[in-house]
């Protein structure tokens, strides 16, 4: 039941948070402007007038003013550094037995912390 209702609701919420509803409304406004202007002008001229920015319709004006009102306040973007906490450090402990790991078909012998390096040191051909 949650998958049938939850996933679509989560996707819808993500769509709205990302501002997708403004894109849908603006697309509807542009389609209406082109359809309305194409009845009196050529299609080329109707598209040019729609996207030049000098001839907005009432819906475009309403969308622009509402987006400006809904914009987050610039003073909320101030980030201050926290100086009361020490930097985080991580100490990982592993078993002392060597393990073989496989990366892209190559077996790699991993020496865990606490094991002495092999003697004599390995020589690599350069």
Image (cartoon, rainbow, N blue to C red):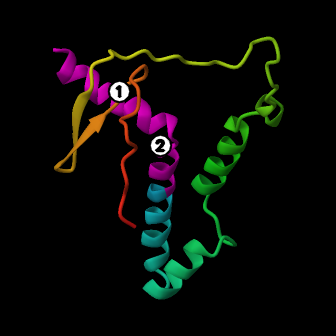
Tag 2's secondary structure? helix
x, y (%) of residue 13? 42, 29
Q: Is residue 33 magenta?
A: no
Q: Residue at x 47, y 87 (%)?
A: 44
Q: Quadrant of residue 32?
A: bottom left
Q: Quadrant of residue 98?
A: top left
Q: Which residues are magenta?
A: 1-26
x, y (%) of residue 111? 35, 30
For residue 21, the mark is 2
The 10 Å Cα crowd at callout 1, few under 14, some 14 to 19, many 20 or more, is few
Looking at the image, residue 31 lies above or below residue 89 = below
What residue does disc 1 label? 10
The 10 Å Cα crowd at callout 2, few under 14, some 14 to 19, many 20 or more, is few
x, y (%) of residue 82? 79, 19
Residues 14 and 69: in front is 14
x, y (%) of residue 125? 35, 64
Looking at the image, residue 94 lies above or below residue 126 = above
Q: Residue at x 72, y 34 (%)?
A: 72
Lower sequence index among marks 2 and 1 = 1
Report the Cα–Cα distance between label 2 and label 1.
Answer: 15 Å
Q: Is residue 2 magenta?
A: yes
Q: Is residue 97 left or right of residue 79?
A: left
Residues 98 and 58: in front is 98
Q: Is residue 76 left or right of residue 25?
A: right
* Secondary structure that dominates the magenta span: helix
Tag 1's secondary structure? helix
Residues 36 and 87: in front is 87
Q: Quadrant of residue 2?
A: top left
């Amino acid at each position: 039941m949650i998958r049938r209702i939850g996933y679509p609701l989560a996707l819808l919420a993500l769509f709205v948070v990302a501002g997708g509803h403004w894109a849908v409304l603006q697309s509807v406004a542009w389609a209406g402007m082109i359809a309305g202007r194409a009845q009196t002008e050529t299609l080329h001229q109707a598209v040019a007038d729609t996207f030049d920015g000098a001839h907005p319709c009432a819906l475009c004006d309403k969308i622009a003013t509402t987006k400006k009102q809904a914009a987050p306040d610039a003073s909320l973007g101030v980030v201050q550094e926290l100086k009361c906490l020490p930097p985080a450090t991580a100490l990982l402990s592993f078993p002392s037995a060597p393990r073989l790991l496989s990366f892209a078909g190559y077996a790699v012998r991993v020496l865990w912390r606490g094991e002495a390096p092999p003697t004599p040191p390995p020589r690599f051909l350069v």
